Amino acid sequence: MIHYFKADLFKIQKEQRLTISLGILALLSFLSAFLLHGNEDFTSSLIQLLSQFITLFFIVPANLFFGEDFTYRTINHIIIKQQTRKRVFFYKVLATLVLDLAYILLAYLLSSSVGLLLGDPVDVAVIIQSFITQTPLFICISLLSILIFVKSNKVNQAYLAFSLMSLLFDNISNLITSNLLHMKLPTDYFLFLSLQQGDHISRLSMGVSFMATILYLYLSYFIFSRKELK
């Protein structure tokens, strides 16, 4: 796996989509800080704003470690050398999670730095605590992106599916349950919305994310282990 890790590092360095996504992430982080300039509750508002779109960037690592390997069939060479899909799968999951969390840290670092330069009251302790509290939910959503890319046979479909879920699924589900089914569910059941609570994420949201994480991981591995690779 060391050789494959080195190959992935080389691929990451040469990947234009990764560079472009990092540039867009930096730009949005700067804009978020500028938009909230002068806000008395700058730190909490910044976390809430970033949490609304930051999970969209999870599609880049998921495509890098799963989508492209399936599209270009490079996954076949790895599996032949390893003789087992389990090690390959968990390596890819770990690499995806690390890169996803790196995106989050970068966004928080850049936006809070701009806030400090603008003279806004940035509470670094709150940002660190929020990141730690949000991490289980970020991991869960990252595994959802992996599941979508493993299940989908086309990268464009996976991009679209995860983007729609990230931006609209929780809001639409909330509207349906409250207006059509007349069931007022707390936002704790909706992980994308719960992210916006920062360091005030409830235990219920943590429990939901834990169960969903186990489910997404199991389904991803189940599909990956049986996926036909031509």
Image (spheres, rainbow, N blue to C red):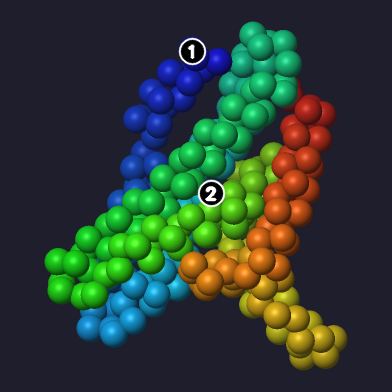
Position of residue 170 relative to residue 83, above or below, is: below
Q: Residue at x 39, y 42 (%)?
A: 18
Q: Which mark is residue 3?
A: 1
Q: Residue at x 35, y 57 (%)?
A: 107
Residue at image mark 2: 59
- Give the secondary structure at mark 1: helix
Within the image, what quadrant is residue 113 found in?
bottom left
Disc 1: CA contacts within 10 A as few (<14), some (14-19) or many (>=20)? few
* Residue in front for this viewpoint, 14 or 45: 45
Among numbered discs 2 and 1, the one appearing first in the sequence? 1
Q: Residue at x 75, y 81 (%)?
A: 185
Q: Residue at x 52, y 33 (%)?
A: 95
Q: Position of residue 227 (x, y in %)?
A: 78, 30
Under mark 1, the amino acid is His
Does residue 68 appear in the picture of this structure? no
* Residue in front for this viewpoint, 124 or 77: 124
Q: Position of residue 110 (x, y in %)?
A: 27, 57
Q: Position of residue 14 (x, y in %)?
A: 35, 30
Q: Position of residue 51 (x, y in %)?
A: 47, 66
